[in-house]
Amino acid sequence: MALIVQKYGGTSVGSIERIEAVAEKVIASKNQGHKVVVVVSAMSGETNRLMGLANEVQGQVAHGRELDVLLSTGEQVTIALLAMALQRRNCAAISTTGAQLNIRTDNKFNKARIQNIDAGLLHRSLDAGKVVVVAGFQGVDDEGNITTLGRGGSDTTAVAVAAAIKADECQIYTDVNGVYTTDPRVEPNARRLDSVTFEEMLEMASLGSKVLQIRAVEFAGKYDVPLRVLSTFSEGPGTLITLEDESMEDPLVSGIAFNRDEAQLTVKGVPDRPGVAAHILGPIADKNIEVDMIVQNVGSDGTTDFTFTVHRNDYERGMEVLENTVVELGGGEVGGDPHIVKLSLVGVGMRSHAGIASRMFTALAQEKINIRMISTSEIKISVVVDEKYLELGVRVLHEAFELDQEK
Ligand code: ADP
Ligand code: ASP
Ligand code: MG
């Protein structure tokens, strides 16, 4: 007998028929003798729909306490329906919201972090023979306010619950049958990976692969939760997220991630003197705008150009901040482009191999894809290119590094 946490994403619970099918899957696991906790997302499209309503009322990108009260309702619908579907099949089940389960988070609305989960509550229901159906993506802060965990947060709920009850495995059921070399919706030749290391998965998630929320991977690594990504709709082993295995021959490049959510901001012709970077980025940070890539050109004629990327939602606000900054700096011209994307190669094997970057740049150049910015770390190389080159760029790199072939 094993203790298993299963998480079903939005598509997997996107209709009554699908919720019924999930109930059947859960019962099959239970009949194998396992104790099962199920974490569910809202029905597909529901969180976006709720966001849209909030944007209309707030007249901007919605945020704050009331947004979380609203967004958390999506998951409240699916836990109740799944618990009903289980009960109707004579399977004892109980639904619980994040607050009811006392999933304690900090008080950062819309992107709260889980701090503690009361495992006792879960164990009591499990020991009574029930399937516990937990609402993903939400918790409660010390003052009793409902919080949500950021988009994709149900993955993190599942891993945190698995860590709290020391589950034998956390299974993330979704609409693809594992983690691929890149998003199979963009590159049909993408290949499923049998396993991927935590480190690589962390990079992929942080560079834009939405198959797992980054915090879920962080949590799983920190608390040693065996994590597997599988398909709701077909059988198969899926992808296991593993610790790095010394005996494995590391592929140079394991995957390609991309991020469509970034925008580029530029200040041209600012006075080239010490402190200018701090002067530009200080006011940006004061507005809680996160900065990703940064490039400052070598100065000439006493001036320099400074470029960085932010989340696309922060583009307009970032521009406003920069307009003020150039006035204070006594020179410079503000520009920007929200139509950019970041493409990244990820692989632990990159550590020991030079030449990957030049292979990457050559492949992009052959397709006349202009690179606007570059950044590297031990196990990744990222480039910023025009949005229109996203699909082409991914396919070209996938081919250049022969990712469709088993290594
Ligand atoms: P869920 O609603 O089940 O949480 P998501 O849409 O959040 O599902 O995540 C699954 C999607 O992630 C897939 O449909 C796929 O398009 C996308 N994806 C992006 N990168 C990858 C990758 N490397 N491997 C597999 N899927 C990926
Ligand atoms: N429903 C939430 C979202 O769409 C959480 C999740 O599905 O993981 O972001
Ligand atoms: Mg998801």
Image (cartoon, rainbow, N blue to C red):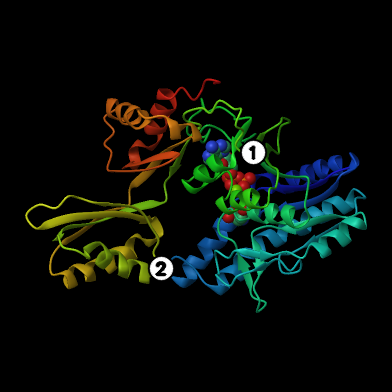
Q: Is residue 13 visible?
A: yes
Q: Which mark is residue 153?
A: none
For label 2, the SS is: loop
Image position of 235 with respect to 106: above or below: above
| Residue matched to label 2 | 288
The quadrant where residue 244 appears: top right
For label 1, the SS is: strand
In-front residue for pair 172/306: 306
Image position of 181 with respect to 405: above or below: below
In-front residue for pair 345/213: 345
| Residue matched to label 1 | 242
Q: Is mark 2 within 8 Å of ligand 2?
A: no
- Mark 1, residues whose alpha carbon is within 10 Å: few (<14), some, or many (≥20)? many
Q: Would residue 349 be found to the left or right of residue 241 on screen?
A: left
Residue displayed at 57% across by 73% down = 66
Residue displayed at 37% across by 44% down = 341
Q: Where does the image place residue 197, in percent across and percent down from the top left?
A: 59, 38
